Image (spheres, rainbow, N blue to C red):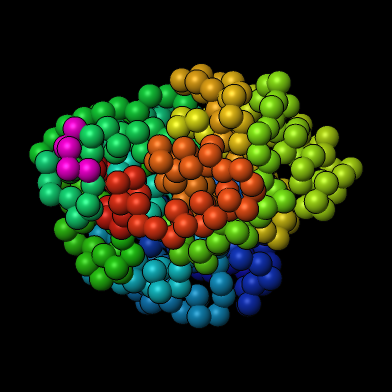
Amino acid sequence: MTASSPVRYLSHEREELPLGRLPELPVLALVSDRDAEATVLRAARRMAAASNVGVAVLRAYTLSKSPSDIVRAFMQVNRVSALVADWPADGDELQSMLRCVVARKVQAVIIRENRSQDLQRVLIPTGGGIHTLQQLWVAREFAAELGIEMQTLHVAHDEPSPRTDSGDPEQRVRNGLRRSQIQARIAGLTGPVQFHKAGDVVSGIQACLRPSDLLVLGAPNYWRVAEHFRGSIPEALSRRVDQSLVMLVAGQSRRTSLREVLWNRTVCLDLQPRDKEDAVRLLIERLAAHGQIPRDAQTRLLDLAMSREAAGSTAVGCETAFPHITIPGLPAVIGCLGICPDGVRFGGDEDSPTRFVFLLITPREFYDEYLGILARIAQLMLLPAVRSSLLACRTADDVIRVLDLEDAAPHTAAGPGNGDSSGGE
């Protein structure tokens, strides 16, 4: 297949290979508009590098079929890790593409570029929905690629909420803002979350937009993405503003049970570390003692964890920290929990004592699974009753039972729900 063909495969080393059934799960770059090609490929390569995979490129503008038909045909033959595409001008075409993405359970990044903009900031409205952590991660990658600043935004609005939140409106607003702050910290965003009150989410976001902003949005829930995208927050914003837009649809991965990540031998009660490095070291030692990691890997893993801490504290508030290590080729997520009744200083914005340290060792290639686990643990740790129950546990089995029961319960007061994750509460 020649370099001028509309379909080609780029390995991680940028070699061109024949395209049949691909040997890995690449990022699929779909280019419908020739003018959007450079932007789509740049984003696709950035995402592929983060997951250590290649890029498969489909130039739909050279073919007679619609982009959604091309994607559908490609995914019948090949599995992909993610789709990066330019935003179709035709609403029906966009809906068809999104329906295919949801059916295949694939993460998608849809980009609309305004080439007349001088981009100076990435604005990230967050509302706690199912796509939020992935949305924040994608926004961080775009900001790093473009070399511009980031700003997270939480819009509190007056629209009726489908959730059964606290009856106190002010408490509901505080809960929503706190959730956005914790999610931003988990995603490695260290600046303050901008807060804005508005009658509805779309007008609230518009009020905070600057002419130089790239707007990174989370998609609505999967049913609405697949069948009723018109009228959703991202679709309404795409009609009302001329800013460059990025929308993230998170992949639907298998829900990993917390028992697959934590078990009684990897829970450390009454941990008494000297400092945060000592806390991480003790948890790594626990994993090695129970055969979860090789003993000779302990020093290297500690160095990796502390390098991550040097880039920004993994303390997220609610007395909780998530030190994190990524390893290429790791087949699953490995976790260890340390409960420190006296607390340990982990840094972060508040610099308050951290009592719950969740060490997670994850595959570099499957970041979505890690984010899903993080989101659920963070959802639990938002609740004071959960933290009190964990501190009261006398055995590791008691801790696992608390997490099991709480993870299975519908915590609507702090949970993300299934609405738009593009901002608002």
In this view, the residue in front, 332 or 344, is: 344
Residue 39, given in percent of the width and then of the height, sits at 44, 47
Asked whether 131 or 80 is in front, the reply is: 131
Relative to 96, say whether 151 is above or below: above
Q: Position of residue 45 (x, y in %)?
A: 56, 50
Res. 62 visible in picture: no
Q: Is residue 253 above or below residue 415?
A: below
Q: Residue at x 63, y 77 (%)?
A: 21
Please say whether residue 203 is one of the residues in the magenta stretch: no
> Residue at (12%, 49%) from the top-left corner?
160
- Number of numbered discs: 0
Where does the magenta region start and end? 166-170
> Which residue extends farthest right?
296
Q: Is residue 123 above or below residue 137?
A: above
Where residue 92 sits, quadrant-wise, is bottom left
Answer yes or no: is residue 58 visible: yes
Task: Give how far across and how far down residue 357 sits, in percent.
Answer: 60, 36
Q: Is residue 82 above or below residue 150?
A: below
Q: Quadrant of the N terminus?
A: bottom right
- What is the x, y in percent for residue 340? 61, 31
Horizontal placement of 196 versus 290: left or right? Answer: left
Q: Residue at x 70, y 26 (%)?
A: 273
Nearest the viewer among 198 and 283 is: 283
- Name the magenta segment's main secondary structure: loop
Tell me which residue sits at (23%, 38%) in the image.
172
Q: In the picture provided, is 89 more to the left or to the right than 371?
A: left
Asked where in the image residue 308 lies, by quadrant, the reply is top right
- The answer to which quarter of the image holds residue 325 is top right
Give the camera-side residue of 375 and 3. 375
